[in-house]
Image (cartoon, helix red, strand yellow):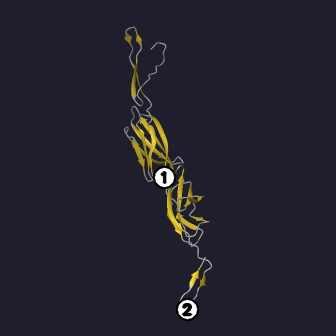
């Protein structure tokens, strides 16, 4: 480099790698004693980090390992309020990780920190568990000809709301309602006597959902205007509308 230079930039190095730099001054054919320094490039972050699979209590992530050199990964799973839920460590060749026993319907943030010496880099992604469905969904027989009552035990975990739909036997929607998280029962009115209906309650959390279903039947309508006709010693006729 020219004598007026006070520095030099090296390009196209390997991420996370430790280098040793030796600097001499040259005058004619003579060289000075070397001045040695060591330096390390910043490690690369993992790439293509994404949610691979999710269920009610499990999140699975995968990624492409960081380029270059690194000592290890630190893997952090954060709750939606930014508190730490869990952490794991892994070697450079690790390309997937799963967390279990999570809260249904909850949003989490995964952060993977790449370590090389005292330097770090990171990549992150969000993932949500599938919400739980309600349990013990049942039709309560209140012996009404034009209404149905369904009850249930609320879903565990986190979710936004319920969507309750009542279907006719031919699959068309008879009624659709929305409910808050603390709702435990639902009435449907204006129904046809003696008909079987199919009720579906969907638990919604973000863009994810889960559902439970049950059937119920309205009471048949009693006959009206019952009367006797053609009464004889040994027979009679009953008529009704």
Percent from the top left, x then y, of residue 154? 53, 61
Mark 2 burial class by Cα count in 10 Å: few <14, some 14-19, many 20+ = few
* Residue that mark 2 sits on: 233
- Image spot of residue 194 (x, y percent): 55, 70
Foreground tag (2 vs 1): 2
Disc 2 to disc 1, how far (Cα)? 72 Å
**In the rendered image, which quarter is residue 45 located in?**
top left
Outermost residue toward the bottom in this view = 233
Q: Quadrant of residue 28?
A: top left
Disc 1: CA contacts within 10 A as few (<14), some (14-19) or many (>=20): many
- Exactly how many numbered labels are in the figure? 2
Marking on residue 236: none
Q: Is residue 58 left or right of residue 186?
A: left
Depth order, front residue of 40/182: 182
Helix, strand or loop at label 1? It is loop
Q: Nearer the viewer, residue 111 or 234?
A: 234
Position above or below: 12 against 166:
above
Q: Locate residue 221, reporting x and y percent.
A: 58, 73
Residue position marked by numbered label 1 in the rendering: 130
- Can residue 20 be seen here? The reply is yes
Name the element at disc 2. loop
In the depicted structure, whether residue 225 falls above or below residue 178: below
Relative side of 227 to 38, left or right: right
- The residue that appears at 40% across and 29% down in the rendered structure is 17
Give the answer, above or below, for where 103 lies relative to 89. below
Q: Is residue 179 visible?
A: no
Q: Residue visible at 39% across and 28% down? A: 18
Which callout, 2 or 1, points at the residue further toward the start of the chain? 1
Q: Quadrant of the C terminus?
A: bottom right
């Amino acid at each position: 480099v020219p004598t007026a230079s006070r520095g030099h930039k090296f390009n196209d190095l390997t991420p996370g790698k430790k280098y040793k730099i030796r600097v001499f001054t040259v005058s004619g054919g003579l060289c000075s004693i070397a001045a040695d320094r060591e330096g390390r490039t910043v490690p690369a972050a993992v790439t293509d980090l994404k949610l691979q699979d999710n269920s009610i209590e499990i999140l699975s992530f995968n990624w492409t390992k960081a380029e270059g050199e690194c000592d290890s990964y630190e893997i952090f799973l954060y709750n939606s309020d930014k508190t730490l839920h869990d952490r794991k460590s892994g070697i450079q060749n690790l390309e997937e990780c799963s967390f279990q026993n999570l809260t249904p319907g909850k949003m989490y943030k995964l952060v993977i920190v790449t370590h090389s010496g005292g330097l770090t880099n990171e990549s992150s992604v969000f993932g949500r568990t599938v919400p739980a469905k309600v349990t013990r969904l049942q039709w309560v027989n209140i012996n009404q000809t034009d209404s149905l009552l369904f009850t249930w035990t609320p879903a565990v975990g986190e979710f936004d709301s319920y969507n309750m739909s009542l279907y006719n036997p031919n699959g068309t929607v008879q009624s659709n309602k929305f409910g808050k998280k603390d709702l435990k029962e639902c009435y449907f009115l204006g129904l046809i006597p003696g008909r079987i209906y199919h009720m579906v309650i969907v638990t919604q959390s973000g863009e994810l959902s889960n559902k439970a279903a049950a059937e119920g039947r309205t009471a048949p309508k009693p006959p009206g205007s019952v009367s006797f006709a053609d009464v004889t010693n040994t027979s009679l006729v009953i008529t009704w509308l």
